[in-house]
Image (tube, rainbow, N blue to C red):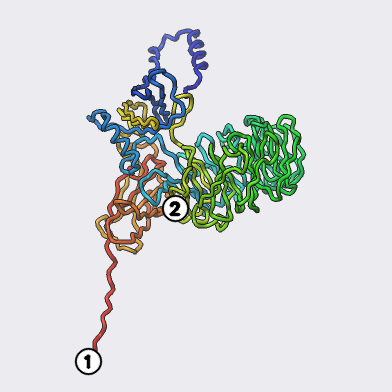
Amino acid sequence: MPGRPGWAVLLVLWMGCQPRKEEGPPAPPPVAAPAPVTVTKAEVSVSFDLQAGEEGTARFVLKNPRTGAPVRGARLLAWMDARPEGQAAPDDAACRARIKTYLGGLLAARAEVDLNSFLLLTLNHDHTLSVIDPQLSFQRTKLKHLVSLGGAAGDWALRPDGGALYVSQPTHGTVSVVDTRRFLVQRNVRVGQKPGRLALAPDGRSLWVDNEGDGTVSVLDTTTQEVLGTLEVGEGQKAFAFGEDGRTAWLSSSGGEELVAVDVASREELGRVTVGTGTRALAYSEVARALYVVREQAHEVLVVDGSRREVVHSVSVAPGPGTLRFEPSGRWAFVLYPHGDRVDILDTASNRVAHSLTGFSAPDQVTFTSAFAYVRNTGDARMSLIELASLEKSGTPAVVQITMGQKKPALARELGRASAIATLPEGNSVLVAGTADRALYLYSEGMMAPRGTHLNYGREPRAVLVLDRSLREVEPGVYAAQARPRKNGPHDVHVLLDSPRTPVCLTWTVSGVPEDAASAGTAPLVLEPRFDSSRHLTAGQRTSLRFRLTPAAQVKDQRPLSPEELQVLVFRPPSGRWQERPVPRRVEESVFEIDVSPPEPGQYVLLVGAESRGAPLGALRDFKLGVQAAPTLRHVSEVHP
């Protein structure tokens, strides 16, 4: 979105009052931004513009062609591709065909700029972070990056703009900052002892860290990644909640007797409220303008007035309350019993338990869409869906049981504290981490079973997040996403509006892309084999292959690559059903080695990429690997007369 121009106007006026300098020619006038291009169909008018460069923003403005009113709440997909020299703009038939190709998700037919992408992030038991692209056509593996965290993770938090991921490291006393563009650990920020739970302020400007080992909370600036200050809260595990539209942070400790109210902007303490020991969870309702506090040992939920900062109600609940979460409207509070079989639902309008549901199995987490509450059961493989619309009706709310995988989460090595359920961008689907199954399950509302399974490559996913890079409505009828075209010149922009289903194609001339990014279509990396690609490998035998990977001469970033930046894929075409992700190791500077073990004779393909350097899998040359059968051992028996 464009910035406010007031400072520029003042600068121009101030410059106009200064004495004119005679030396030198006058400065050239600023270059005007290109006007948006517009295509009008019977159903919709689509205008497009792109501010290119290192980080550009693609903007689509949708209007009703008859009334000029903005089209709100639209679902649209869009792609950009550089047009080959001498090729004409696509007609309607070619436009439809190209969109159909993009929807197929084939690796070889991916657009230069995909404005619909989202990535799946999993926090794994082996101190790694997996980055998975669910839109590749390969059916069994979609791993893009594997980030080594260097230690066991306590919790994680994604900045609202998606620009950084924070991971607490209890054994190291640090918070790792992961760059979500290159997927590398950018830095490790030292905080207190045994940092565990993390909470981002609603505005995303500060990260609040529970230092479980010393009774403090560290506050980090998410712009500078520096510690702003440390607050004394109390011994034990902390809980966080943000109220008054994110202006006030509420902090508690399981070993302390007081809640601490802190001004988010200044970090100054605003007051304390005595509630007693054993605080387990906090949640703030903007509708009720109140803080709800779970006291596990006292079997109660306290209601604290947010402005007066005093306890105004106490709600008795069953023994062993744990998690407390509000659904999106802020009216209904869900209380889970991780050692029991029930879920209580509190109505903030009356501050009483409106529904007590049983039949769960050690429920410990809940995540919401606009239609359902998703409750994870750790004692079996069921996911319980509670219909939110039924909460206001008389009688028992509707609950649907969905089996997710084979093994109950309790069979995993450890249950993480971060959420194992993530809502997908379309809003009516979720991704569930099958921790003990070492898999991810994709579920869409209305179905009685998951509609997709992604294996997590032998790792237990303790938590899952969705990094959404797709188009979103930033103001009425205006949809935007970050776009980084790598070439200057004419690009075909393909748009598909979901309802009514309308394909639209238009042309945009990209300019301002840095020369090292464009490089006239030249790949940013040079890949050279250090093995004889004509020599056949043997099925079932592990073979080491070496290759050299260096930045191309025209690229400004000439740093040697590290193994952590590389992605390697070996698969068997055409379906890609057998695949292997060898882990590269550095032999010498710019020379790497992998081990491959094709299972059967046939033809295989080796791909090498480094997305952080602008070369995702498929952008560089590939290598064909011929595999022959292992020799048969013959046993010759001696015949004696």
- The residue labelled by disc 2 is 455
In the rendered view of the protein, which quadrant contains the C terminus? bottom left
Q: Position of residue 631 (x, y in %)?
A: 27, 69
Of all residues, the one furthest to the bottom in this rendering is 641
Left or right: 275, with 474 as reference point:
right
The tag earlier along the polypeptide, 2 or 1, is 2
Dot in front, 2 or 1: 2
Q: Is residue 210 at all visible to an observer of this figure?
A: no
Secondary-structure class at tag 1: loop
Determine which quarter of the picture holds residue 520.
top left
Image point 26% across, 80% down: which residue?
636
Q: Position of residue 543 (x, y in %)?
A: 34, 60
Image point 50% across, 36% down: which residue?
163
Of all residues, the one furthest to the front in this rendering is 394
In this rendering, is residue 31 above or below 50? above
Task: Work out whether residue 99 or residue 529 is closer to the camera in this orientation and state it.
Answer: 99
In this rendering, is residue 514 above or below 637? above
Residue type, mark 1 in image: Pro
Secondary-structure class at tag 2: strand
Determine which quarter of the picture holds residue 531.
bottom left
Residue type, mark 2 in image: Leu
Task: Work out whether residue 489 or residue 304 is closer to the camera in this orientation and state it.
Answer: 304
Q: Position of residue 236 (x, y in %)?
A: 70, 48
Q: Position of residue 484 (x, y in %)?
A: 39, 33
Q: Which numbered dot is residue 641? A: 1
